[in-house]
Image: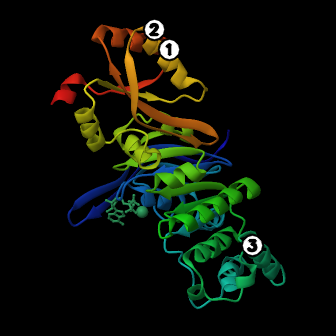
Amino acid sequence: MSALVRLEAVSKSYATPAGTVTAVQDLSLEVAQGEILGVIGYSGAGKSTLVRLVNALEKPTSGRVFVGDDELTALPEKRLREVRREIGMIFQQFNLFRSRTVAGNVAFPLKLAGVKQPERDARVARLLDFVGLLEKAHAYPEQLSGGQKQRVGIARALATDPKLLLADEATSALDPETTADVLALLKRVNRELGVTIIVITHEMEAIRAIADRVAVMDSGRIVESGPVYDVFAHPSTTAAARFVATVLHDRPSADTLTRLRAAHPGRLVTFAVPEQKGFTGQLSRAFADHGVENEIVFGGIGELQERSIGALTYELTGADAAIDAALDALRARGVDLVEEVELEEQTA
Ligand SMILES: Nc1ncnc2c1ncn2[C@@H]1O[C@H](COP(=O)(O)OP(=O)(O)OP(=O)(O)O)[C@@H](O)[C@H]1O
Ligand SMILES: [Mg+2]
Protein backbone atom coordinates (compact mmCIF):
# COMPACT_ATOMS: atom_id res chain seq x y z
CA MET A 1 0.00 0.00 0.00
CA SER A 2 1.63 3.19 -1.15
CA ALA A 3 0.52 6.45 0.39
CA LEU A 4 -0.65 9.17 -1.97
CA VAL A 5 -0.95 11.69 0.87
CA ARG A 6 1.13 11.72 4.00
CA LEU A 7 1.04 14.18 6.88
CA GLU A 8 3.83 13.99 9.41
CA ALA A 9 3.20 15.62 12.78
CA VAL A 10 1.47 18.59 11.18
CA SER A 11 0.32 21.55 13.23
CA LYS A 12 -1.34 24.72 11.99
CA SER A 13 -1.92 27.74 14.21
CA TYR A 14 -3.40 31.10 13.41
CA ALA A 15 -2.62 34.32 15.19
CA THR A 16 -5.87 36.12 15.96
CA PRO A 17 -6.59 39.25 18.01
CA ALA A 18 -7.89 36.93 20.71
CA GLY A 19 -4.67 34.89 20.75
CA THR A 20 -3.31 31.86 18.96
CA VAL A 21 -5.82 29.38 17.56
CA THR A 22 -4.47 25.91 16.86
CA ALA A 23 -6.67 24.48 14.11
CA VAL A 24 -4.64 21.30 13.50
CA GLN A 25 -2.40 19.81 16.13
CA ASP A 26 0.36 17.23 15.73
CA LEU A 27 -1.62 15.36 13.14
CA SER A 28 -0.17 12.39 11.28
CA LEU A 29 -2.12 10.66 8.55
CA GLU A 30 -1.63 8.51 5.47
CA VAL A 31 -4.07 8.17 2.62
CA ALA A 32 -3.41 5.15 0.43
CA GLN A 33 -3.49 5.33 -3.34
CA GLY A 34 -6.99 4.36 -4.51
CA GLU A 35 -8.86 4.54 -1.22
CA ILE A 36 -11.72 6.70 0.01
CA LEU A 37 -10.84 8.20 3.37
CA GLY A 38 -13.63 9.81 5.36
CA VAL A 39 -12.70 12.52 7.84
CA ILE A 40 -15.46 13.29 10.31
CA GLY A 41 -15.64 15.86 13.06
CA TYR A 42 -17.82 18.54 14.58
CA SER A 43 -17.69 22.15 13.49
CA GLY A 44 -14.32 23.68 14.33
CA ALA A 45 -12.53 20.32 14.57
CA GLY A 46 -10.04 21.45 11.92
CA LYS A 47 -11.33 19.53 8.90
CA SER A 48 -11.21 22.36 6.37
CA THR A 49 -7.80 23.40 7.62
CA LEU A 50 -6.64 19.84 6.97
CA VAL A 51 -7.95 20.11 3.40
CA ARG A 52 -6.16 23.43 2.84
CA LEU A 53 -2.93 21.88 4.11
CA VAL A 54 -3.24 18.98 1.68
CA ASN A 55 -3.89 21.19 -1.34
CA ALA A 56 -1.17 23.61 -0.25
CA LEU A 57 -3.44 26.60 0.21
CA GLU A 58 -1.95 26.75 3.71
CA LYS A 59 1.54 26.03 4.98
CA PRO A 60 1.86 24.03 8.17
CA THR A 61 3.23 25.85 11.20
CA SER A 62 5.24 22.69 11.81
CA GLY A 63 5.42 19.22 10.33
CA ARG A 64 5.46 18.08 6.72
CA VAL A 65 2.85 17.33 4.06
CA PHE A 66 3.58 14.99 1.15
CA VAL A 67 1.48 14.41 -1.94
CA GLY A 68 3.04 11.55 -3.88
CA ASP A 69 6.78 12.04 -3.55
CA ASP A 70 6.56 15.81 -3.26
CA GLU A 71 6.88 17.56 0.05
CA LEU A 72 4.64 20.56 -0.49
CA THR A 73 6.48 23.13 1.59
CA ALA A 74 9.74 22.34 -0.19
CA LEU A 75 8.39 22.86 -3.71
CA PRO A 76 9.10 25.79 -6.01
CA GLU A 77 5.96 27.66 -7.09
CA LYS A 78 5.94 26.14 -10.59
CA ARG A 79 5.98 22.55 -9.34
CA LEU A 80 3.43 23.45 -6.67
CA ARG A 81 1.02 24.57 -9.39
CA GLU A 82 1.52 21.25 -11.16
CA VAL A 83 0.83 19.33 -7.96
CA ARG A 84 -2.29 21.41 -7.31
CA ARG A 85 -3.53 20.53 -10.77
CA GLU A 86 -3.42 16.90 -9.71
CA ILE A 87 -5.78 17.67 -6.84
CA GLY A 88 -9.48 18.24 -7.51
CA MET A 89 -11.73 20.05 -5.04
CA ILE A 90 -15.47 20.12 -4.53
CA PHE A 91 -17.28 22.32 -2.03
CA GLN A 92 -20.46 22.58 0.00
CA GLN A 93 -21.63 25.64 -1.96
CA PHE A 94 -20.47 24.17 -5.31
CA ASN A 95 -18.52 27.37 -6.21
CA LEU A 96 -19.61 27.31 -9.85
CA PHE A 97 -19.16 30.33 -12.14
CA ARG A 98 -22.68 31.72 -12.45
CA SER A 99 -21.94 33.51 -15.71
CA ARG A 100 -20.69 30.37 -17.44
CA THR A 101 -22.69 27.45 -18.76
CA VAL A 102 -22.31 23.96 -17.38
CA ALA A 103 -19.93 23.14 -20.24
CA GLY A 104 -18.11 26.44 -19.67
CA ASN A 105 -17.58 25.59 -16.01
CA VAL A 106 -16.10 22.20 -16.83
CA ALA A 107 -13.99 23.65 -19.65
CA PHE A 108 -12.51 26.36 -17.43
CA PRO A 109 -9.69 24.35 -15.79
CA LEU A 110 -8.88 22.84 -19.18
CA LYS A 111 -8.45 26.33 -20.64
CA LEU A 112 -6.15 27.23 -17.75
CA ALA A 113 -4.15 24.09 -18.43
CA GLY A 114 -3.81 25.10 -22.07
CA VAL A 115 -5.90 22.26 -23.53
CA LYS A 116 -6.96 23.34 -27.02
CA GLN A 117 -10.14 22.75 -29.02
CA PRO A 118 -11.38 20.29 -30.14
CA GLU A 119 -9.83 18.13 -27.42
CA ARG A 120 -11.35 20.42 -24.81
CA ASP A 121 -14.88 19.94 -26.14
CA ALA A 122 -14.38 16.21 -26.32
CA ARG A 123 -13.19 16.04 -22.73
CA VAL A 124 -16.03 18.23 -21.48
CA ALA A 125 -18.57 16.00 -23.24
CA ARG A 126 -17.00 12.88 -21.80
CA LEU A 127 -17.02 14.33 -18.27
CA LEU A 128 -20.61 15.54 -18.52
CA ASP A 129 -21.62 12.14 -19.80
CA PHE A 130 -19.86 10.50 -16.86
CA VAL A 131 -21.78 12.61 -14.34
CA GLY A 132 -25.05 12.22 -16.29
CA LEU A 133 -25.49 15.86 -17.35
CA LEU A 134 -24.73 15.88 -21.05
CA GLU A 135 -28.15 17.30 -21.87
CA LYS A 136 -27.52 20.23 -19.49
CA ALA A 137 -24.30 21.32 -21.20
CA HIS A 138 -25.75 24.67 -22.23
CA ALA A 139 -27.74 25.39 -19.08
CA TYR A 140 -26.54 27.88 -16.46
CA PRO A 141 -25.92 26.89 -12.83
CA GLU A 142 -29.00 28.76 -11.57
CA GLN A 143 -31.13 26.50 -13.75
CA LEU A 144 -29.89 23.38 -11.96
CA SER A 145 -30.86 21.59 -8.75
CA GLY A 146 -28.33 21.33 -5.92
CA GLY A 147 -27.48 17.76 -6.83
CA GLN A 148 -26.97 18.72 -10.48
CA LYS A 149 -24.75 21.62 -9.45
CA GLN A 150 -22.58 19.29 -7.42
CA ARG A 151 -22.35 16.93 -10.41
CA VAL A 152 -21.02 19.86 -12.43
CA GLY A 153 -18.61 20.56 -9.57
CA ILE A 154 -17.41 16.97 -9.75
CA ALA A 155 -17.02 17.07 -13.54
CA ARG A 156 -15.06 20.31 -13.26
CA ALA A 157 -12.87 18.89 -10.49
CA LEU A 158 -12.08 15.87 -12.68
CA ALA A 159 -11.31 17.91 -15.79
CA THR A 160 -7.54 17.90 -15.39
CA ASP A 161 -7.42 14.20 -14.50
CA PRO A 162 -6.52 14.59 -10.82
CA LYS A 163 -5.14 11.69 -8.79
CA LEU A 164 -6.75 13.05 -5.66
CA LEU A 165 -10.17 14.56 -5.01
CA LEU A 166 -10.91 16.56 -1.87
CA ALA A 167 -14.59 16.87 -0.99
CA ASP A 168 -15.20 19.38 1.82
CA GLU A 169 -18.79 18.95 3.05
CA ALA A 170 -19.76 18.31 -0.57
CA THR A 171 -23.16 16.90 0.34
CA SER A 172 -23.99 19.06 3.36
CA ALA A 173 -26.26 21.39 1.38
CA LEU A 174 -28.21 18.53 -0.21
CA ASP A 175 -31.25 16.56 0.91
CA PRO A 176 -30.72 12.90 1.91
CA GLU A 177 -31.77 11.40 -1.42
CA THR A 178 -29.63 13.75 -3.49
CA THR A 179 -26.79 13.17 -1.04
CA ALA A 180 -27.00 9.44 -1.72
CA ASP A 181 -26.84 10.05 -5.49
CA VAL A 182 -23.83 12.33 -5.22
CA LEU A 183 -22.05 9.88 -2.90
CA ALA A 184 -22.75 7.06 -5.35
CA LEU A 185 -21.21 9.19 -8.10
CA LEU A 186 -18.13 9.81 -5.96
CA LYS A 187 -17.82 6.09 -5.42
CA ARG A 188 -17.82 5.60 -9.21
CA VAL A 189 -15.15 8.28 -9.52
CA ASN A 190 -13.07 6.22 -7.13
CA ARG A 191 -13.79 2.73 -8.45
CA GLU A 192 -13.96 3.45 -12.18
CA LEU A 193 -11.43 6.25 -12.54
CA GLY A 194 -9.11 5.20 -9.72
CA VAL A 195 -9.19 8.63 -8.07
CA THR A 196 -8.21 8.68 -4.39
CA ILE A 197 -10.80 10.65 -2.41
CA ILE A 198 -10.80 12.40 0.94
CA VAL A 199 -14.37 13.04 2.06
CA ILE A 200 -14.70 15.66 4.78
CA THR A 201 -18.03 15.61 6.57
CA HIS A 202 -19.89 15.96 9.83
CA GLU A 203 -22.39 13.30 8.72
CA MET A 204 -21.58 9.73 9.66
CA GLU A 205 -24.08 8.50 7.06
CA ALA A 206 -21.80 9.84 4.32
CA ILE A 207 -18.88 7.92 5.83
CA ARG A 208 -20.94 4.76 6.04
CA ALA A 209 -22.08 5.16 2.43
CA ILE A 210 -18.71 5.44 0.73
CA ALA A 211 -15.59 5.51 2.87
CA ASP A 212 -13.14 2.62 3.12
CA ARG A 213 -11.43 4.12 6.14
CA VAL A 214 -12.46 6.82 8.56
CA ALA A 215 -10.53 9.28 10.71
CA VAL A 216 -12.38 11.02 13.54
CA MET A 217 -11.16 14.55 14.23
CA ASP A 218 -11.62 16.41 17.49
CA SER A 219 -9.95 19.68 18.46
CA GLY A 220 -7.42 19.55 15.64
CA ARG A 221 -6.37 15.96 16.24
CA ILE A 222 -7.26 12.59 14.84
CA VAL A 223 -8.57 10.80 17.91
CA GLU A 224 -9.47 7.56 16.19
CA SER A 225 -9.06 5.99 12.77
CA GLY A 226 -9.45 2.66 11.06
CA PRO A 227 -11.44 0.66 8.54
CA VAL A 228 -15.04 1.91 8.54
CA TYR A 229 -16.48 -1.41 9.70
CA ASP A 230 -14.09 -1.62 12.64
CA VAL A 231 -14.78 1.91 13.86
CA PHE A 232 -18.54 1.39 13.54
CA ALA A 233 -18.38 -1.97 15.32
CA HIS A 234 -15.95 -0.91 18.05
CA PRO A 235 -15.68 2.84 18.45
CA SER A 236 -13.05 3.39 21.10
CA THR A 237 -13.51 7.11 21.77
CA THR A 238 -16.61 8.96 22.91
CA ALA A 239 -16.39 11.17 19.81
CA ALA A 240 -16.47 8.16 17.47
CA ALA A 241 -19.20 6.42 19.47
CA ARG A 242 -21.41 9.51 19.19
CA PHE A 243 -21.02 9.66 15.43
CA VAL A 244 -21.69 5.94 15.10
CA ALA A 245 -24.84 6.27 17.20
CA THR A 246 -26.23 8.86 14.75
CA VAL A 247 -26.31 6.16 12.08
CA LEU A 248 -26.86 2.83 13.74
CA HIS A 249 -29.31 3.67 16.54
CA ASP A 250 -28.43 0.28 17.94
CA ARG A 251 -27.28 1.34 21.39
CA PRO A 252 -29.54 3.10 23.85
CA SER A 253 -28.90 6.80 24.42
CA ALA A 254 -28.60 8.10 27.99
CA ASP A 255 -32.28 9.11 27.92
CA THR A 256 -33.39 5.75 26.60
CA LEU A 257 -31.30 4.02 29.26
CA THR A 258 -33.06 5.97 31.97
CA ARG A 259 -36.42 4.80 30.62
CA LEU A 260 -35.17 1.23 30.23
CA ARG A 261 -33.91 1.20 33.80
CA ALA A 262 -37.26 2.38 35.07
CA ALA A 263 -39.09 -0.36 33.20
CA HIS A 264 -36.62 -3.22 33.70
CA PRO A 265 -35.34 -4.09 37.16
CA GLY A 266 -32.89 -6.76 35.91
CA ARG A 267 -29.30 -6.19 34.78
CA LEU A 268 -28.99 -4.44 31.42
CA VAL A 269 -26.18 -5.74 29.25
CA THR A 270 -25.33 -4.66 25.68
CA PHE A 271 -23.62 -7.03 23.24
CA ALA A 272 -22.07 -6.17 19.88
CA VAL A 273 -23.52 -8.38 17.18
CA PRO A 274 -20.73 -10.29 15.45
CA GLU A 275 -20.67 -11.12 11.75
CA GLN A 276 -21.27 -14.84 12.29
CA LYS A 277 -24.79 -16.20 12.25
CA GLY A 278 -26.44 -17.78 15.26
CA PHE A 279 -25.49 -15.12 17.78
CA THR A 280 -28.79 -14.85 19.66
CA GLY A 281 -28.95 -18.65 19.87
CA GLN A 282 -25.49 -18.70 21.42
CA LEU A 283 -26.59 -16.15 24.00
CA SER A 284 -29.84 -18.01 24.76
CA ARG A 285 -27.97 -21.28 25.39
CA ALA A 286 -25.49 -19.64 27.75
CA PHE A 287 -28.29 -17.99 29.71
CA ALA A 288 -30.28 -21.25 29.86
CA ASP A 289 -27.17 -23.17 31.04
CA HIS A 290 -26.91 -20.82 34.01
CA GLY A 291 -30.61 -20.42 34.73
CA VAL A 292 -30.66 -16.75 33.73
CA GLU A 293 -33.86 -15.31 32.36
CA ASN A 294 -33.37 -12.95 29.48
CA GLU A 295 -35.24 -10.53 27.30
CA ILE A 296 -34.08 -8.24 24.51
CA VAL A 297 -35.08 -4.70 25.48
CA PHE A 298 -33.25 -2.60 22.88
CA GLY A 299 -31.21 -3.07 19.77
CA GLY A 300 -30.77 -3.02 16.06
CA ILE A 301 -28.95 -5.02 13.43
CA GLY A 302 -28.03 -3.54 10.08
CA GLU A 303 -25.55 -4.01 7.32
CA LEU A 304 -22.31 -2.22 6.59
CA GLN A 305 -20.05 -3.10 3.67
CA GLU A 306 -22.12 -6.26 3.28
CA ARG A 307 -21.38 -7.38 6.83
CA SER A 308 -23.86 -7.39 9.69
CA ILE A 309 -23.39 -4.85 12.40
CA GLY A 310 -25.35 -3.77 15.42
CA ALA A 311 -25.93 -4.31 19.10
CA LEU A 312 -28.51 -5.93 21.35
CA THR A 313 -29.31 -4.88 24.89
CA TYR A 314 -30.63 -7.65 27.14
CA GLU A 315 -32.31 -7.52 30.50
CA LEU A 316 -30.93 -10.40 32.54
CA THR A 317 -32.79 -11.64 35.60
CA GLY A 318 -31.57 -14.20 38.13
CA ALA A 319 -28.97 -14.62 40.84
CA ASP A 320 -26.04 -12.23 40.40
CA ALA A 321 -23.54 -15.07 40.56
CA ALA A 322 -25.43 -16.97 37.84
CA ILE A 323 -25.50 -13.91 35.59
CA ASP A 324 -21.78 -13.33 36.16
CA ALA A 325 -21.05 -16.96 35.32
CA ALA A 326 -23.09 -16.76 32.11
CA LEU A 327 -21.32 -13.55 31.06
CA ASP A 328 -17.91 -15.04 31.89
CA ALA A 329 -18.72 -18.09 29.80
CA LEU A 330 -19.74 -15.88 26.89
CA ARG A 331 -16.63 -13.74 27.20
CA ALA A 332 -14.52 -16.88 27.21
CA ARG A 333 -16.11 -17.76 23.86
CA GLY A 334 -15.12 -14.37 22.48
CA VAL A 335 -18.51 -12.68 22.75
CA ASP A 336 -18.14 -8.91 22.83
CA LEU A 337 -19.92 -7.57 25.88
CA VAL A 338 -19.96 -3.89 25.07
CA GLU A 339 -21.37 -2.54 28.22
CA GLU A 340 -23.23 -3.39 31.35
CA VAL A 341 -25.24 -0.64 32.92
CA GLU A 342 -23.94 -0.51 36.46
CA LEU A 343 -26.30 -1.59 39.21
CA GLU A 344 -25.66 1.61 41.18
CA GLU A 345 -26.46 3.62 38.07
CA GLN A 346 -29.64 1.65 37.64
CA THR A 347 -30.88 2.56 41.07
CA ALA A 348 -29.52 6.13 41.04
N1 LIG B 1 -7.77 31.64 8.77
C1 LIG B 1 -8.06 31.41 10.06
N2 LIG B 1 -7.77 32.30 11.01
C2 LIG B 1 -8.04 32.08 12.31
N3 LIG B 1 -8.62 30.96 12.77
C3 LIG B 1 -8.94 30.01 11.87
C4 LIG B 1 -8.69 30.19 10.48
N4 LIG B 1 -9.13 29.08 9.83
C5 LIG B 1 -9.63 28.27 10.78
N5 LIG B 1 -9.53 28.81 12.00
C6 LIG B 1 -9.95 28.20 13.27
O1 LIG B 1 -9.45 26.89 13.32
C7 LIG B 1 -10.41 25.99 13.84
C8 LIG B 1 -10.71 24.91 12.83
O2 LIG B 1 -11.37 25.48 11.72
P1 LIG B 1 -11.83 24.62 10.45
O3 LIG B 1 -12.47 25.54 9.49
O4 LIG B 1 -10.68 23.82 9.98
O5 LIG B 1 -12.91 23.65 11.12
P2 LIG B 1 -13.93 22.65 10.42
O6 LIG B 1 -13.74 21.34 11.09
O7 LIG B 1 -13.77 22.70 8.94
O8 LIG B 1 -15.35 23.26 10.84
P3 LIG B 1 -16.74 23.28 10.03
O9 LIG B 1 -17.33 21.90 10.21
O10 LIG B 1 -17.53 24.32 10.75
O11 LIG B 1 -16.46 23.61 8.61
C9 LIG B 1 -11.61 26.84 14.21
O12 LIG B 1 -11.52 27.15 15.57
C10 LIG B 1 -11.46 28.06 13.35
O13 LIG B 1 -12.04 29.18 13.96
MG1 LIG C 1 -15.04 23.20 7.39
What amino acid is labelled 1 in the image?
Arg
> Residue at (39%, 38%) from the top-left corner?
251
Q: Which residue is at 26% across, 65% downward?
A: 16
Residue topped by disc 3: 127
Residue beneath disc 2: 289
Q: CA distance from mark 3 to mark 1?
A: 57 Å
- Residue at 70% x, 76% y is 113
In this view, the residue in front, 44 or 9, is 44
Q: Is mark 1 within 8 Å of ligand 1?
A: no
Q: Is residue 192 visible?
A: yes
Q: Quadrant of the C terminus?
A: top left
Spatial CA distance of label 1 from label 2 is 6 Å
Q: Nearer the viewer, residue 115 or 180?
A: 180
Give the residue type at disc 3.
Answer: Leu
Whole-number angstrom distance, CA of label 3 to CA of label 2? 63 Å
The label on residue 51 is: none
Nearest to N terminus: mark 3 or mark 1: 3
Mark 2 belongs to which amino acid? Asp
- Which residue corresponds to mark 1? 285
Check disc 2 and report its element: helix, strand or loop: helix
Mark 1 and mark 2 in contact? Answer it, CB < 8 Å.
yes
Which label sits in the foreground, 3 or 1?
Answer: 1
Picture coordinates of residue 296, whole percent (x, y): 41, 30
Give residue 75's position: percent from left, percent from top: 58, 59
